[in-house]
Amino acid sequence: DSPQSVTHGQTTAFTLTPSVGFAIDSVGGTCGGSLVGNTFTTSAITGNCTVVASFVALSYTVTPSAGAGGSITPNSPQSVTHGQTTAFTLTPDVGFSIDGVSGSCGGDLAGGIFTTDPVIADCTVVASFISGAEDTSTSLGAVVGPVALGSDVNLLVTVTGTATAPADGTVEISADTGESCIDAGPPQSSGSEATFGCTIAFATPGPRLLTASFSGSQTHNDSVSAAQALDVVRIADLSVSIQLGDGEIETGQPVTYLIEVRNAGPDAAPGSSINVVADPSLIASDWICEPVGSALCSSETGSGDISTLEELPPGSGLDFTLVGEIAELVDGSLILEAEVTTDAAAPNHVVDEALGNNNATSTALESRIFSDGFE
């Protein structure tokens, strides 16, 4: 491809070599001459001149066809440039499913789309179909649990055909506790996958197993998903606080505490454990319980430390008044600790997602008065 020096009246020849996928198109320029095969010979040279070779990309014919039971689109021969691919859509008739694709082009079938390998020669694509519905598999999307009692839970189901996605049919999601929902379609489809979805609000707490079933398609067989476990819980926000009735304490003197237990909801908290302990223990201590809102005290009175299981409706609580005599304080302080906890086990299934207010501590220091009247 470098300039050539030619004696006046002589000719010179050039060899044209197309790249892979290209063919010789023509030779132009000012030298004149003739092309035989891939050799171009100039006319007799009588002055400076040029030889310009042109090449053209090769193209091939891809011929599609379809057997009985379906169609292929496009259904006419396609011209494809060397090294490129082309795609065809396979559509089975009602009562048929895609069996496979043969021919000389090679390629891959994904859903109902067949894409050839890079085309390097004339070739064929032959779609075949089989009588009968296409098999499916059904899977239920993962649900991050636990879920709150009464809340809407959005559930997604994927139905996958062996070659194509179903365009019809119904999915039902059911729990072993009786709840269910139905999506009658049509689904959203991509490739061989169809996506269905529906919503369930669970009215009772506790664990359950969910399964999804696909049925009613004219082109695809029924299938059922594996079971997926889901835990439904009550959500409560329990809190406890302590108020000391007097700012100073003395050994042998009475002391009064107010312990307030509350449930901010949104759900009831049956089986809530309330524990109040003094260190050192109070002498001859007694307590009374007073309900707040719709709560009820399981015991209205008691003695000693408080340890009780209570049902706390949302927006309600219990007030405990604890009275006792202060024992000898070795280090000069009286500590009262209170705790309220939910019952996550069956049958209550209560979860408290805000644990920072479930404990309270009151530390009171003894007022030391000496015989001379000074502290």
Image (cartoon, grey):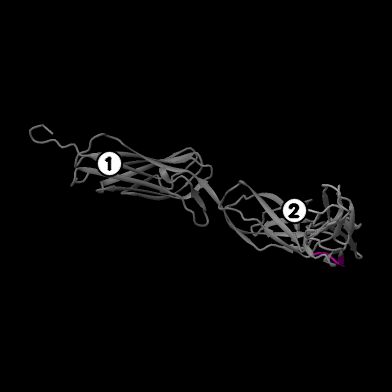
Q: Is residue 255 left or right of residue 231?
A: left
The reply to whether discs 2 and 1 touch (Cβ–Cβ < 8 Å) is: no
Total labels drawn = 2
Q: Nearer the viewer, residue 313 or 114?
A: 114
* Mark 2 lies on residue: 2
Q: Secondary structure at mark 2?
A: loop
Q: CA distance from mark 2 to mark 1?
A: 100 Å
Q: Nearer the viewer, residue 295 or 48?
A: 48
Residue 168: in magenta span: no
Residue 193, percent across and down?
74, 57
- Disc 2 or disc 1, which is closer to the eye? 2
Tell me the quarter of the picture where residue 259 sits.
top left
N-terminal of the pair, mark 2 or mark 1, is: 2
Residue drawn at point x = 50 percent, y = 43 percent:
313
Disc 1 marks which amino acid?
Thr
Tell me the quarter of the picture where residue 172 sits.
bottom right
Quick one: label 2, few (<14), some, or many (20+) residues within 10 Å? few
* Mark 1 lies on residue: 363
**Residue 289 can be seen, yes or no:** yes
- Image quadrant holding the C terminus, namely top left
